[in-house]
Image (cartoon, rainbow, N blue to C red):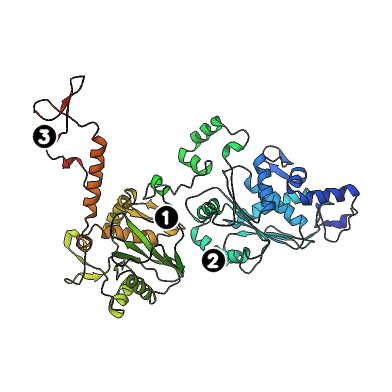
Amino acid sequence: MPGDDIYLGNPNLKKANTPIQFTKEQVAEFIKCKKDPVYFAAKYVKIVSLDEGLVPFDMYKFQKKLIKNFHNNRFNICKMPRQTGKSTTVVSFLLHYAVFNDNVNIGILANKAATARELLGRLQTAYENLPKWMQQGIIAWNKGSLELENGSKILAASTSASAVRGMSFNIIFLDEFAFVPNHIADSFFASVYPTITSGKSTKVIIVSTPHGMNHFYRMWHDAERGRNDYIPTEVHWSEVPGRNAKWKKQTIANTSEEQFRVEFECEFLGSVDTLISVAKLKTLVYNDPIKKNAGLDIYENPIDDHSYIITVDTARGIDGDYSAFIVFDITDFPYRVVAKYKNNEIKPMLFPSIIHDIAKAYNWAYTLIEVNDIGDQVASILFFDLEYENVLMCSMRGRAGQIVGSGFSGKKSQLGVRMTSAVKKLGCSNLKTLLEDDKLATCDYDIIAELTTFVQRKNTFMAEEGCHDDLAMCLVIFSWLVAQDYFKEMTEQDVRKRIYEDQKNQIEQDMAPFGFLNDGIHDDAGFVDSDGTRWSSGAEYGDRSFMWEYL
């Protein structure tokens, strides 16, 4: 090929509009590669090995299976361990797609734009090492994009709405999607994703190692349940040659058991130091609401003779935090989340009307609003302007702190509750007890997701960086409320006493087969076993309530 036929002085790249005279064998090979992306990757794709430099892509069995799935299905989601060549596998398929399809747009999206460009770099390296007769001529060749003379274009960008808004793609690759912050994923799915999936032949490939219970977690489990169009593919670490029990033991020794479970066993564990134990978080299962509209999700319709409470966390409505509330059915144990509202665009002036409508629908539910910031305005509008009488109030009672009541009493009374360190500490403690003792139930995805990232930071609990805790704080407010004397008066339920009795009864049941040892001094209805040991019911020891921790 003459020197002026190469692209920008790169001898490995063919300039656009360069004539190629195919041999009969090359035509047959081209057709074979077009039909079989696995054959193409195995014979023509080269990758950079840390130890050996540029080498042919010697695929594992599961990598061949992945490429077949990508080729045969529109929507794929893959849960894979670290260091299994998942990105290289996808890049090989994308290269095939760009070369053998005309006028297609391909998006490579990652958590960070630099990561996406690095993936594009791998594709470009593989492209440079294709035979000249198989290459399409180059129109543009940049760090963040490329264009071929067959009309195919590839863009590398971050997974955000702003990065790809207004663009249309034929195939999009979402790399390590579990690591995309929740608020960015929310924006992406709301504004960009519908346009991506609207085509009849559009492909979407999502590949990631788990990282808590987030968008990737939800899409994966929906795929497993057959609730979306994605084909789920799971790869176990043992499918990589050379990884055995010895390798596992060595890896755990160099990292930790928990890290291994997340990165290699691919468990959807929450963040470290979560308020709610990992064991409990793993048991929480989400369901779809029966009704859904503009941030409101309803799981149970109001029941005439049931009692409900609503707790509210208010934001400023400027695209940051969310204004949120949760509706609880407190008629009996376990208390249940029956509805929730979450919206980061609602204005504080309009938020009270939504609270009013839902509270009225749920049997004029008592409502407790956090009033540290703009919440004070929300509570005032709800109580004074909309004349909703069931807004709970708090008053200061010296060392007792804030006390819930039904009306104003004294100079230090206020609508709603101020979130102080004392209120939050008690609320968090009670929330942990309620959830882990199965006294509070929720099947809402957003609530569960927030609990997995509600972690200890310094001396308190809050959302992990990049996450939200608006719904979690509604749970904290509710958990603080149930310990109040006024709650007992409203519901005729003493939560602490109920939990205490349940725990006491459970321990007594566990001890029942064994009874209590007797010193033999008192004559009772016990018995003596074959070893001469006397057993009894233990009634003679009197009240043992001091043995139980009062929660």
Q: Is residue 403 left or right of residue 277?
A: left
Disc 1/disc 2 C-alpha distance (Å): 20 Å
| Residue 390, x across and y down, in percent | 26, 71
Helix, strand, or loop for circle 1? Answer: helix
Above or below, 361 relative to 29 = below
Place of residue 377 in the rendered image (x, y in percent of width and height, measured from the top left): 32, 74
From this viewpoint, is residue 464 visible?
no
| Residue 284 visible within the image | yes
Cβ–Cβ below 8 Å for labels 3 and 2?
no
Estimate how packed mark 3 is, as few (under 14), some (14 to 19) or many (20 or more) residues with alpha carbons within 10 Å. few
**Spatial CA span between label 3 and label 1:** 47 Å
Q: Earlier in the sequence, mark 3 or mark 1?
A: 1
Residue at 37% from the left image edge and 62% from the top image edge: 338
In the rendering, which numbered label is found on residue 540?
3
Residue 104 lies in what quarter of the image? Answer: bottom right
Give the label on residue 190, or none: 2
Badge 1 crowding class, 10 Å Cα cut-off, few under 14, some 14 to 19, many 20 or more, is many
Q: Amino acid at mark 1?
A: Ile
Q: Which type of secondary structure does the marked residue at label 3 adopt? A: helix
The CA distance from mark 3 to mark 2 is: 67 Å
Q: Which residue is mark 1?
A: 448
Above or below for 238 versus 155: above
In the picture as drawn, the residue positioned furthest to the left comes out as 522
Please provide percent x and percent y for residue 160.
Answer: 57, 62
